[in-house]
Image (cartoon, grey):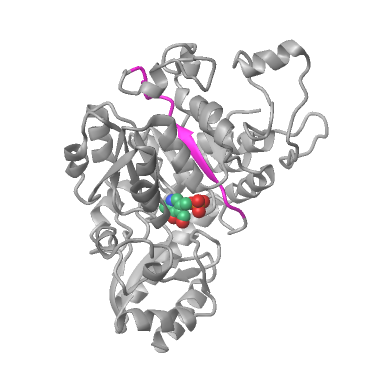
Amino acid sequence: MSEHTSFDTIAVQAGHSPDPTTLSRGVPVYRTSSFTFKSAEHAANLFALKEFGNIYSRLGNPTNEVLETRVSQLEGGLASVSVASGTAAIFNTVITIAKSGDEIVSASNLYGGTFTMFDAILPDFGITTKFVDVRKSEQFEKAITPKTRLLFLETIGNPALDVADIDAVSAIAKKHHLPLVVDATFTTPYLLRSIEHGADVVINSLTKWMGGHGTAIGGIAVDAGNFDWSDPKFELFNRPDPAYHGLRWALDLPPELRKIAFALRFRTGPLRNLGACLAPDNAWHFLQGLETLHLRMPRHVDNALAVAKFLAKHPKVSWVRYPGLEGDPSYELAKRLLPKGAGGMVVFGLKGGKSAGVKFIECLSLFSHLANVGDAKSLAIHPATTTHSQLSEEQMQEGGITADLVRLSIGIEDQGDILADLERGLAAT
Ligand SMILES: Cc1ncc(COP(=O)(O)O)c(C=O)c1O
């Protein structure tokens, strides 16, 4: 397999060369639960991590491995673990690093499901979250206590679209020797190489722009490969792990594996024993999507900017947020961090509030009304009554979600057709 350095070539080729047995050029889908061992010694070596190889598809699968290699290279990390959803990638990342009694410091402007995980589910497992305002990076530092084990943010928050100052937060993480975990779903490595800005773990919901066609659910966590876990405060990496032969992940591995201790512990602990594995068929869908990531993203960005400009001038629109729109509160940050564009999402408020929003969504025809983002097709939803409806009013306010907010995920259709559909919807309100 040849090594590639250009993003576009990695997206198309990395992780796979023609299969030596069948000469298949496409990545084969290894639809199998298990793999035979060559000998008893081979089996024992695989289980003891003395040798890497396939055992059982809950732990890893060759189709998924192509995906993991490709995404690691696109993000500039050393190892990845793919799982059943973006949500599973976040949960398994957290429990790979933190345990009962530990704390997370997280931006509050999160996807509703992630907010609920941090706010209403992890506390029952003894992991609590301090939420901070992403627009005030210094709040991350103020919220750190001796119990903090990781900092968390979305590179562009869902749905309010505030861009996180990843450089400022990663400087705080480094100062306190804490890993910075970022959910990069709204940027993808095409728009932002989070590791180059100091992220230690990068999560993507593959369901969105990475897969790009709304055909499968999946997630991935990339280990940047340069966090030192040997600080005793990371107890899960320094105590003999009862879930893995008493191994101390930060201490007992050879140096080249110690670098990817996070990815190894994730795979052999939470993934192996809690089971949120990605089906190889879905890994294949994401590989198909990744081959055109570098072609789709510029189009998403161009169309989203055109929509933002159109809405900003429209008499029926009270406000618009798109980080690439001049005057947006995140515009300066987007200019610095996202030179290739500020993503494919646009949110706005309609004069006439919630009822106008409902009417607008119902009158769209090119846009599909559904609970997803990052599809090649344009999508629309009203978060306050759907994706974020579990949140209290106060939590909605903290996350920047107003009752009149309409969320658009701008697809790669013809720009004129997209704008005409929006005009039709607005005329109906
Ligand atoms: C920013 C962000 N992160 C994570 C997720 C969860 O991903 P999944 O639906 O693949 O579990 C979503 C879903 O909408 C999201 O928008």
Up-down: is 269 above or below 216? above
The answer to whether residue 265 is left or right of residue 131 is right
Q: Can residue 76 be seen in the rendering of this structure?
A: no
Q: Magenta region's main secondary structure? A: loop
Which residue in the rendered view is the most extreme toward the right?
22
On the image, the x and y values in percent for residue 49 come to: 59, 17
Q: Does the magenta segment cover residue 222?
A: yes
Tell me what residue is drawn at x 33 percent, y 41 percent. Answer: 152
The answer to whether residue 31 is left or right of residue 164 is right
The answer to whether residue 417 is left or right of residue 18 is left
Up-down: is 260 above or below 313? above
Tell me what residue is drawn at x 51 percent, y 74 percent. Answer: 367
Tell me what residue is drawn at x 53 percent, y 38 percent. Answer: 71
The answer to whether residue 252 is left or right of residue 19 is left
Q: Can residue 332 be seen in the rendering of this structure?
A: yes
Up-down: is 123 above or below 150? below
Q: Does the magenta segment cover residue 417?
A: no
Q: Give the residues in magenta.
A: 216-230
Q: Nearer the viewer, residue 106 or 201?
A: 106
On the image, the x and y values in percent for residue 33 come to: 73, 36
Tell me which corner region of the image, top left, top right, bottom left or bottom right, holds residue 376. Answer: bottom right
